[in-house]
Amino acid sequence: MKGKRKWLLCPLIVVALLLCAIPAYADMPTLPHAFYGTLTITGSPAPVGTVVTAKVNDVQCGSITTTVAGQYGGSGAFDPKLTVTGEIETGATIEFYVGVAYTGEAYDYAFSPGAVTEHNLVVGVDDDPPEVYLTPLSPDPTNDNTPTFTGTATDALSNIASVEYQVGAGSWRVWTAATAVDGAFDEPSEEYTFTIPALADGGYTVYVRATDAASPPNTTLEADHASDSFTVDTTAPTVVSRYPTSGQTNVPLAATVTATFSEAMNASTITTSSFTLKIGSTPVSGSVSYNAGTYTATFDPAADLTNDTIYTASLSTAVTDAAGNALSAASTWSFTTGTVPDITPPSVNVTPLSPDPTLDTTPTFTGTAIDTQSNIAGVEYKVDSGSWVAATASDGTFDSLSEGYTFTTSTLSTGEHTVYVRATDAASPPNTTLEANYATDTFTVNPSGVIPGDANEDGVVDILDVTKTERIIAMLDAETTGADANEDGVVDILDVTKIERIIALLD
């Protein structure tokens, strides 16, 4: 019995020695995680030969090819399985692919070293087209005839296989992660960038669409696409008209300066720095505006322009169109303002030199004609509704230096008359018509010398004539011719009233 025990102890000693010789567990490789289960594609068992792969962090870590329809691997100890192996951290996410189609997050599984897991997989039909987003990197509209675009192409069920673009009705141009045409597509990030080859000026629409990697493969590009319309404009703007025009004279003092361009402009570049007005080298103060509807820039001076002065307007090449193209060349032009217009008529006054009323049938008048802006050119008069007669004729004189005049009328009939006087000024441009404003004087021609109302015959109608008339009415004094103030042939109380009205300047 003792001998048998000794022989039993020998194997135990050998095992203990072997265990001591094994290296530390930290150096042992990570155990694999094995999977098996059913496999359904579009509601049907997957055919034999279908490849199932597993990826961790987009790196393939195992694959298996089906040998039984609808089944990958088996549950038996010696059945093949999808073995996920490698330097993988516990808990890392395992993604499963059937062909090139991703099964989706619902079938992701956490890595567990040494585990054997039944994991049934299902993939459906990829009938959801990729979504494509498009953003222009060049401005819109642009002065770049090779505009660049960027964006993303995303797909809910599978990776994007390729992206292509088309300009207008042109051909579709394709590029993939492996082969770039005009641009590049990064399959992991689903981002793309492309630059269109040189285009002529004009309006365009660019379209972008994508291919996904569905299983069964989606071999045609999806009809859904993103688009963006843009304008290529590489033509420099020009100035097509100006006001005042170059070399224009007699420009109104209240004028504004305008420049009209050949196309829509960038209003922010039209400022008092890029659009200026000067007298010699001295800037003129003002404001600048731009009318987008007429493509017209306006310089509005802060005050009226100075008369008879040369002004120079300038547009610099800092002015650009809406696409950023600078003015083809700086534009400078000059014009000359007119003189201050004479719109104020001369003022005229008139004074009779003969007494009023008068015994003179050819009365003489005098006065001055004054103008605030220019010399008087001449004076003319008329009596009642007669014709106008120049005071510089043989019946009168006009002194342009003193602006004084004198004239004697032609012979007038007995009775009341009115004389009218008006003047011509020497405005530039000439005021060719006599001013409507005039002076007047009303007088009476009485060759007999009798002054109605002058009852006491002292040559003046005053309060003494009232007393004299009253005495005549009372038969205290003899009747006089002038006492008949109202000239009705009788000296009575009505003549007293008439004299009072004459004294009050009412008659």
Image: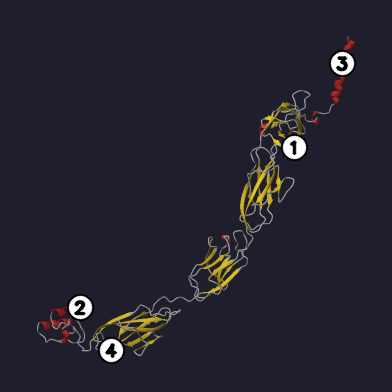
Residue 376, given in percent of the width and then of the height, sits at 40, 82
Quick one: label 2 or label 4, which is nearer the N terminus? Answer: 4
Distance between the Cα atoms at labels 2 and 4?
Answer: 29 Å
- Could you classify mark 4 by the number of other residues whose Cα lies within 10 Å: few (under 14), some (14-19), or many (20 or more)? few
Left or right: where 452 falls relative to 224: left
Q: Which mark is residue 204?
A: none
As measured in the structure, the alpha-carbon distance from the residue carrying label 2 to the one carrying label 3 is 171 Å
- Residue nearer the viewer, 192 or 17: 192
Q: Nearer the viewer, residue 481 or 430?
A: 430
Q: Quadrant of the N terminus?
A: top right
Are the residues at dot 3 and dot 1 in contact (C-beta closer than 8 Å)? no
The residue tagged 3 is: 9
Instruction: Please tell me in which quadrant of the rendered image residue 91 appears.
Output: top right
Marks 3, 1: nearer the viewer = 1
Viewer-side label of 1, 2: 1
Task: Give me the C-alpha separation between circle 3 and circle 4.
Answer: 177 Å
Sequence order check: which comes first, mark 2 or mark 3?
3
Q: Secondary structure at mark 1?
A: strand
Q: Give me the C-alpha separation between circle 1 and circle 2.
A: 128 Å
Q: Is residue 471 above or below residue 184?
A: below
- Please say if the residues under marks 4 and 1 sit with CB atoms less than 8 Å apart: no
Instruction: Give the side of residue 268 with respect to residue 491, left or right.
Output: right
**Residue that mark 4 sits on:** 411
Q: What secondary structure is marked by label 2?
A: helix
Label 2 sits on residue: 501
233 in relation to 29, above or below = below
